[in-house]
Structures are given as structure tokens and as C-alpha cells.
Image: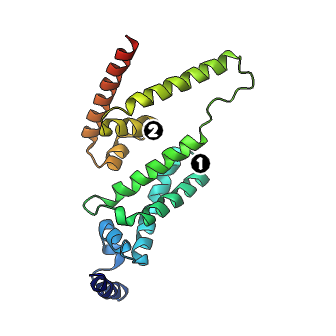
Amino acid sequence: MGATRAKAEPAVVGRDVAGGSHALHELTSERLAWRAGRGCQASFAELVHRYAPRLQAFLRRRTHNLHEAEDLVQDTLLKAYRNLSRYDESRRFSTWLFTIAARAAASHYRRRRPDCVCLDTEAPACDEAVGRQEQRERLWTMAAQLPEGQYRSLWLKYAEDLPIKEIARVMGKSQVCVKVLLYRARVNLARRLNDVDL
């Protein structure tokens, strides 16, 4: 079976190079990802060409820093390349790629976020900051117990600060579905908080 793939791929690449009906720029992203996963470097280069500018804009809104966004684009593309074998071809490639980017941004944010930097640990401002940090951690711990879709929508909305439209794209759901998930997540989280406070 491996030999069959090896023989079939050069024929397709040959048609692409000759400018036939299957030139790389005419292929869907999903088809390019399938080909790249089977060793076609030109297909992955075409995906990079298509998505790098979009990823940079997406990640720059998360980091507010061009250089950090550029680094995260490289990380995202590298992770995508290394994990092409895990890509589910029945799903949109853009959703898969932007999910990787959102996770990379979340990891970056967690690494950079200062816990509480206070010179005077007795200062009321430090006590308030520590209290807020503990409250945030408590909320996210409770949120992690929600159903996966609800937790993920909360994370993308409040930790990643993504608009509904982008959350829908990353999750592969409609905007209405994302709004419903967020509503249910808030209601369920409020109930859990009330139960704990009682």
C-alpha cells in the first residue's frame, strides 16, 4: 500500500508542475493537508502561503505584539506540520489550524502572566491582587468541571478574548451554538458558585 502511494504522488505532482487542472493553488486546504501529510512539501508550502497572514492577524490581536505574534505563527505552523497525521480530514483544515493557534496563544499568555509582583507583601494592593488571583483560579477550576464544549467556549471567550465569530470557527460550530454554550456555561457556573457559597 505504501508503494502505491509513493507511485501515485509523483504523477499528481507532475500534473501540478505542468500547470494541469490540479495546480496547488486550485486545491482545497483539506486536500493540501492530505497531500502534505503524505510528504508533499509543496502542498504544505501552499498552506503556509494561505494561512500565515491570517494566523498573524489572529495572533496579533491576542498578543498585541507583532514579534510575539510572528513567533506564535511559526510555533503554530510547526505544530501543525508535526501533527498532520492527526488531522481529521472530515473537518475543515482552517478550524484545526486556528485551534492550534488559539492553544499556542493561551500557553503563551499563561507563561507571560505575572502572578503578583509586590515589593511590600503587607500592602493592601498585593492582598487584593492575591485574592483576585485565587478567585480566578477557583472559577477556572469550577469551569473545568463543566461539559467540554461549555468549558472550551468560556476559555476562548474570557481567557482568549475571542469574538463569537472566531470561537465558532475554532470550535467548528455555528455562532448561535456558541452563544447557547456560553449561556449554559454561565448558568451552570453560577449554580455551582451558589452551591459552594451556601
Q: Is residue 164 left or right of residue 90?
A: right
Q: Quadrant of the N terminus?
A: bottom left
Q: Work out whether 55 lies above or below 184.
A: below
Numbered label attached to residue 158 = none
What amino acid type should be assigned to the residue bearing mark 2?
Asp
Q: Position of residue 93 (x, y in %)?
A: 33, 60
**Which secondary structure lies at badge 1?**
loop
Q: Residue furthest top?
A: 198
Q: In this orientation, which residue lies closer to the viewer: 22 or 109? A: 109
Q: Work out whether 100 lies above or below 38.
A: above
Q: Position of residue 89 (x, y in %)?
A: 28, 63
Q: Residue at x 71, y 17 (%)?
A: 122
Residue position for label 2: 161
Q: How many marks?
A: 2
Q: Quadrant of the C terminus?
A: top left
Q: Crowdedness of circle 1 by 10 Å Cα count: few (<14), some, many (20+)?
A: few
Q: Crowdedness of circle 2 by 10 Å Cα count: few (<14), some, many (20+)?
A: some
Cα gap from disc 2 to disc 1, whole angstroms: 15 Å
**Which secondary structure lies at badge 2?**
loop
Q: Work out whether 139 lies above or below 85.
A: above
Residue position for label 1: 65
Q: Earlier in the sequence, mark 2 or mark 1?
A: 1
What amino acid type should be assigned to the residue bearing mark 1?
Asn
Q: Position of residue 11 (x, y in %)?
A: 30, 88
Q: Residue at x 33, y 32 (%)?
A: 146
Q: Position of residue 19 (x, y in %)?
A: 34, 86
